Image: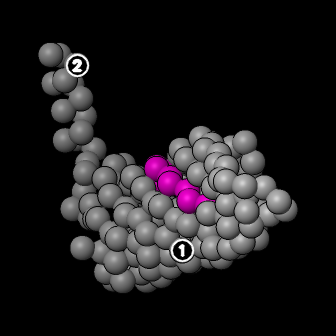
Amino acid sequence: MRKLALLTLVLVAVGPSASAQTSFIGMGGYNIDAEGFLVGLGARFGVPFGGPALNLALQPTIETVLIGDGVTYIQGDVNVVAAFGGGGSLSPYAGAGLAIAHTSFDTDSFARGTGDASNTDIGINALVGTSFGSGSLRPFAQARATFADGSSISLMGGVMIGI
């Protein structure tokens, strides 16, 4: 009970600030290792602590890489993102988190195989990016490295829509 009271006191003392924000994310980009364009959706749930200099947020996303030829690639991420700066027109951020990547193959599309094959990997992400603007509609650019059974690098851009 004392720990809960202490935690509550600390949370009240350091934040969250009034700038806590939730955003929906629409993104597109290119997965360099899969050699395919990607599209995805996500959200950012801001819980800024530590004042205006450091804002932490939880950012779950899901995307698919458009590979074709009987290959389906879907990746889901849950990242913790730290945005640096006071939220001006240029807001850099960095983050890390977990990734689950699922790849399925229609073996009829390759050689003379029959049936399907699939693989699911769990890995970690490291990402850096920046958002532009300070309104409720903010474009962003981001680079993400995923380290799993097979590592990949993705370059992304999109828009965050604040609600």
Q: Position of residue 64 (x, y in %)?
A: 56, 67
Viewer-proximal residue among 14 and 111: 111
Q: Give the residue type that dot 2 points to.
A: Lys
In this rendering, would 112 be left or right of 82?
A: right
Q: Residues within 10 Å of mark 1 (few under 14, many from 20)?
A: some
In this rendering, would 105 be left or right of 102?
A: right
Q: Nearer the viewer, mark 1 or mark 2?
A: 1
Viewer-proximal residue among 61 and 92: 61
Labels 1 & 2 near each other (Cβ < 8 A): no
Q: Position of residue 104 (x, y in %)?
A: 63, 55
The residue stretch that appears in magenta:
73-82
Q: Give the residue type that dot 1 points to.
A: Val
Q: Position of residue 26 (x, y in %)?
A: 44, 76
Task: Give the dominant element type of the magenta stretch: helix, strand or loop.
Answer: strand
Question: In the rendered view of the protein, which quadrant contains the C terminus?
Answer: bottom left
Magenta-colored stretch includes residue 78: yes
**What residue did someone put label 2 on?**
3
**Residue name at image x 27 percent, y 61 percent:** 20
**Residue name at image x 47 percent, y 61 percent:** 62
Q: CA distance from mark 1 to mark 2?
A: 43 Å
Viewer-proximal residue among 58 and 33: 33
Question: In the rendered view of the protein, which quadrant contains the N terminus?
Answer: top left
Compared with 141, 111 (above or below) is above
Compared with 98, 142 (above or below) is below
**What residue did someone put label 1 on?**
39
Compared with 75, 157 (above or below) is below
Q: Residues within 10 Å of mark 2 (few under 14, many from 20)?
A: few
Q: Position of residue 119 (x, y in %)?
A: 65, 46
